[in-house]
Image: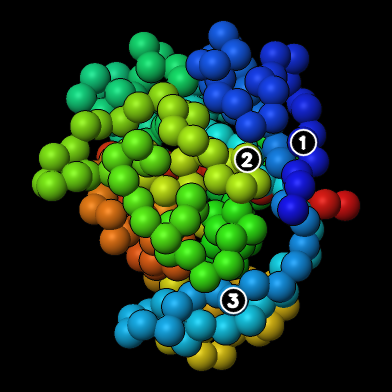
Amino acid sequence: MTTLTVLIALLLPMSGTSAAENGTTTSEVAVELVLIPGGEFLMGDSSDGDHAPAHAVHIDSFYIDRYEVTNAQFYRFCEETGHQLPEFWGKKDFHSGPDFPDYPVVGVSWSDAAAYAEWAGKRLPTEAEWEYAARGGLIGKRFPLGGKLDSTQANFTVGGVAKGLVPAGSYPPNGYGLYDMAGNVVEWVFDRYSADYYAVSPGRNPQGPESGKFRVIRGGGWHSGPSCCRVYFRNALPANWRDFNVGFRCARDLK
């Protein structure tokens, strides 16, 4: 499959290349959207866990951010709206604050992420959209780049050692040209969480349970082990939780 890129920023890298390779910063390209072509895929996995049963889901075409939302982008939102700054803002250990403009923002709750997305004219991706995009067109693979994961492909904890956040787009993109769908920061998605939701999930554009105290997070992060980086791995946090390992990216309807 191919992707159609919507070029919103003035300075954008060539398709499939990183910001660093093109001499630009991710704060200049973070508003770039990629069109994900609609289709059907097998969501989840047949192994034991809340990611079972694997089930067929049809997703309509949608746009999703090529990069995770950065400190620079979120700071602009806070300045223009008066929204509170992230929880760890200004702390170098978490690469949070104006000194790290091209790093993914962390220390934001689900509500913070949803507010940013609305301000930007977007929304949070659904859990199904996120997994469909993370798979990058691959079928039956556990990670965004294939069946295995190593430290050259994503930023995650290896052997109990975490290297900390790195700038968005530092690792190779998946088949849809999306960066950091595994590692760097775990990402908030739209859906509320239920461990048994997959048993009753509709087969077309599922939106998650209608109620629940927790919101789903996806993708693994710099402080996560490799198993958390599987494309079907699910986890959840309270909507008001702010974590040094959790950020987000946005989506937008096609119409």
Q: Are marks 1 and 2 in contact (CB under 8 Å)?
A: yes
Mark closest to the chain's N terminus, 3 or 1: 1
Determine the residue positioned at 21% across, 32% down: 163
Residue farthest to the top? 23
Residue farthest to the bottom? 199
Residue 76 seen from this side: no
Query: Residue 252, percent across and down?
Result: 73, 48
- Find residue 177 and name its label: 2
Determine the residue positioned at 30% across, 24% down: 95
Amino acid carrying label 1: it is: Thr
Circle 2 packing at 10 Å, graded few (<14), some (14-19), many (20+), is many
- Mark 2 element type: loop
Q: Quadrant of residue 24?
A: top right
Circle 1 packing at 10 Å, graded few (<14), some (14-19), many (20+), is some
Whole-number angstrom distance, CA of label 1 to CA of label 2:
9 Å
Query: Residue 67, percent across and down?
Result: 56, 35
Q: Quadrant of residue 249?
A: top right
Mark closest to the chain's N terminus, 1 or 2: 1
Determine the residue positioned at 55% across, 24% down: 18
Residue farthest to the right? 255
- Mark 3 element type: strand
Amino acid carrying label 2: it is: Gly
Residue farthest to the left? 160
- Find residue 5 and name its label: 1
Which residue position holds label 3?
42
